[in-house]
Image (tube, rainbow, N blue to C red):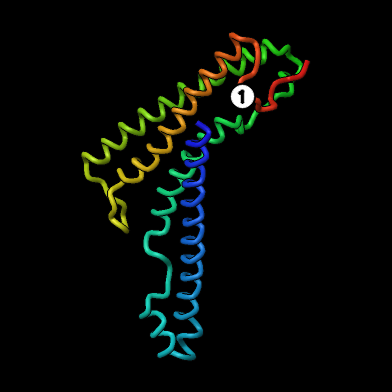
Amino acid sequence: MEKLARAMAVVGGLVLSILIVITCLSVAGRALNTVFHGWVGQLMPRVSQWFLDMGVGPILGDFELVEAGVAFAIFASMPLCQITAGHASVDIFTNNFPRGLNRFLRMIIEIMFAAVLILIVWRLYEGMLSKKSYGETTFLLQFPIWWAYAASLAGAVAAAISGVYMACVRIIEFLRGHRIINDDLEAEV
């Protein structure tokens, strides 16, 4: 499970890195486009027009790519976050609870988290089928919207698998009374 989670996180990180480069290039292109249409265009119209003809400007559909890619990157990072108990937690009160109660609470939380992740997978799948059947596309790039749903679905399925795994681990930990996965979240009382 940890290998799957780490592989998904690496792929999600690579996609996010590519999106950062796309965003930076698009912002720089937009700024250069403004310069070439502004004072440089007035001082050196031929040079300015040459650069504009070369395609200097924002990347077409950059926000569409970012929108689809970020959704995938978020879902791709969830399995590692789930396996390592990296989700935000407020444990001001629970630190003072007995171990058995903390194990019970963690088991309930993991079961609920797994159920929510399964619900997300189901709804993403239904949404993907809906977008595919209607043939919806993005405005500028005209790529099918269901592709973004499919990419997000792949990450969500991995997150759901890791969520179910962690729910099973927490159930076994509760029933046996000791930790299987050490995540340093259990109170030492």
Point out the image quarter for the C terminus. Answer: top right
**Amino acid type of the residue that numbered disc 1 sits on in the rendered structure:** Ile
Residue located 47% across and 22% down the image = 164
Image quadrant assignment for residue 133: top left
- Relative horizontal placement of residue 154, taking residue 106 as reference (left or right): left
Q: Is residue 20 above or below residue 82?
A: below
**x%, y% of residue 90?**
68, 27
**x%, y% of residue 123?**
36, 30
Q: Is residue 154 above or below residue 120?
A: below
In-front residue for pair 84/65: 84
Would you name the residue on which mark 1 appears?
A: 181
**x%, y% of residue 69?**
43, 49
Q: Is residue 140 above or below residue 148?
A: below
Residue density around tag 1, few if under 14, some if 14–19, many if 20 or more, within 10 Å: few
Image quadrant assignment for residue 175: top right
- Relative horizontal placement of residue 155, taking residue 127 as reference (left or right): right
**x%, y% of residue 143?**
29, 53
- Relative horizontal placement of residue 34, taking residue 95 as reference (left or right): left
Residue located 61% across and 12% down the image = 104
Residue located 64% across and 10% down the image = 177
- Relative horizontal placement of residue 96, taking residue 169 as reference (left or right): right
Residue located 45% across and 21% down the image = 115
